[in-house]
Image: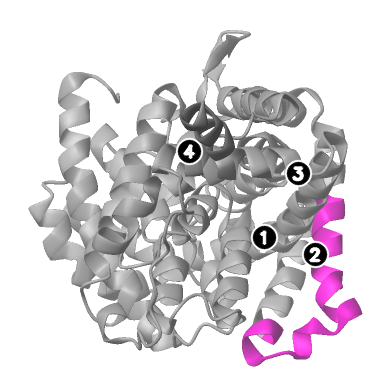
Amino acid sequence: MNTRTAATASSPPIPVAALLRLLAYSSIGLVMFFLPLEIAGKTTILFDHAASYMAQQQRSLSVALVLALMVWGAAAPFVKGSWRASTTSAVFSVLKVLGLVLALMYLLKLGPAPLFEKDMLPFLFDKLALTVGLIVPLGAVALAFLVGFGLLELVGVLMQPVMRPIWRTPGHSAIDAVASFVGSYSVGLLITNRVYSEGKYTAREAAIIATGFSTVSAAFMVIVAKTLGLMPAWNFYFWSTFVIAFAVTAITTWLPPISRMDNTGSVSATLPAGRNRWQAACDAGLAQASNAPPLWRVLRDNLRDGLAMASAVVPTILAVGLIGLLLARYTPVFDVLGLLLLPFVWLGGLAEPVATSKALASGLAEMFLPALMLKGADPVVRYVAAVVSVSSVLFFSGSIPCVLATRIPISLRQMVGVWFVRTALSILLAAGVGHIAFAQGWIA
């Protein structure tokens, strides 16, 4: 009798409503992100179908919506006064205005002829800006189901035992790491900065999360995959990129400049008393499912955040993308930078190593540039470009200025060093996986 009473006390009843929310909403999120469906002869995931429908069947409406987002994004820094925050903020505020001007030039057919070549403004606007402007808000809504109702917390607790020995971060950082990867660098950096400010990360731990996991969102990965013709292999691409990015982070934590950063005050998380890991994981997931706001509110907040993110990113990538393409075509900037990556491209056995290394080096300016420059390459090179675009994490048109805006004590010079290390390692790992995948017929 006493034993039965003790067991009951240690195992509280499962809240049925929370369990149903966790299972139902998380399942919807998994289906939206990871179950390719064939509709009208095209196989892809659900919100990509929605974005494609909008872009192709409702083009006028889609252009109007994306242009409105760009107007909002270009005006916001000056309306809010945030352009004064730093030199970086001022530069990117100007780039957003430039992006809006370029969009208007393209739509009104005004400007020099070289800008209207098919791989310049037409490609940047129709295939990139328009797609990003639609997919990011739709992806943000889908992401609400995946990360808002307990699945993330449950997986995070289960991952705790491997975080400290492999990635040199505390157990609770698993939630941050997965949220950063599956969500977006802006969401991930917001979490990381908050946790660091509360003293729960050391400088090195915060830098590991910020430069190792805070990459582009799954919605952006869809855009990369579409550009490089990898959507038929979406699940393979997503999960292999996930593994490669995490493996690269595990290696970079032991290499300079990350390994030399201050780690004073590091602590390790422990399980709640009387609970094993699975029980603690279920507790965390059910607690989030129970305490999460109503679905409509989560969807509303995610849509608002997705629109805000798209408004900031779309004009920037249009401006930086064009600058990058012009530099790649008319200057030797990326030729020189690409020489540093050439040995790794050669070791990876990739076709046209000089052109490939140049294109991969352009990812430092904008993560989409390798995809733009290598969209006609062979399957293995396209796969490597798709992985490296995400796994490199750091790029000047997005994540680098976001990191600089946080309290995380990592310099621009250190971030460029991390970018080089991550890119070199990503090339080698992705090339190995890509050759195997091509031989097995997983990519074509």
Q: Earlier in the sequence, mark 4 or mark 1?
A: 4
Task: Name the amino acid, label 3.
Answer: Ala
Judged by its main secondary structure, the magenta piece is helix
Residue at which label 4 appears: 279
Residue at which label 2 appears: 73
Task: Name the amino acid, label 1.
Answer: Val
- Region in magenta: 66-90
**What kind of element bears circle 1?**
helix
Mark toward the viewer: 1 or 3: 3
Label 4 neighbourhood size at 10 Å, few (<14), some (14-19), many (20+)?
A: some
Is there a contact, CB below 8 Å, between mark 4 and mark 2? no
Q: Where in the figure is residue 43, as x and y percent of width and height?
A: 52, 16
The correct choice, above or below, for 250 with respect to 23 in the image is below
Marks 3 and 2, how far apart at CA: 29 Å
Marks 4 and 2, how far apart at CA: 44 Å
Mark toward the viewer: 3 or 2: 3
Marks 4 and 1, how far apart at CA: 40 Å
Residue at which label 1 appears: 313
Residue 152: in sight, yes or no?
no
Marks 1 and 3, how far apart at CA: 28 Å
> Relative to the observer, which residue lies in front, 323 or 66?
66
User: Can you tell which mark lies on residue 292?
Assistant: 3
Is there a contact, CB below 8 Å, between mark 1 and mark 2? yes
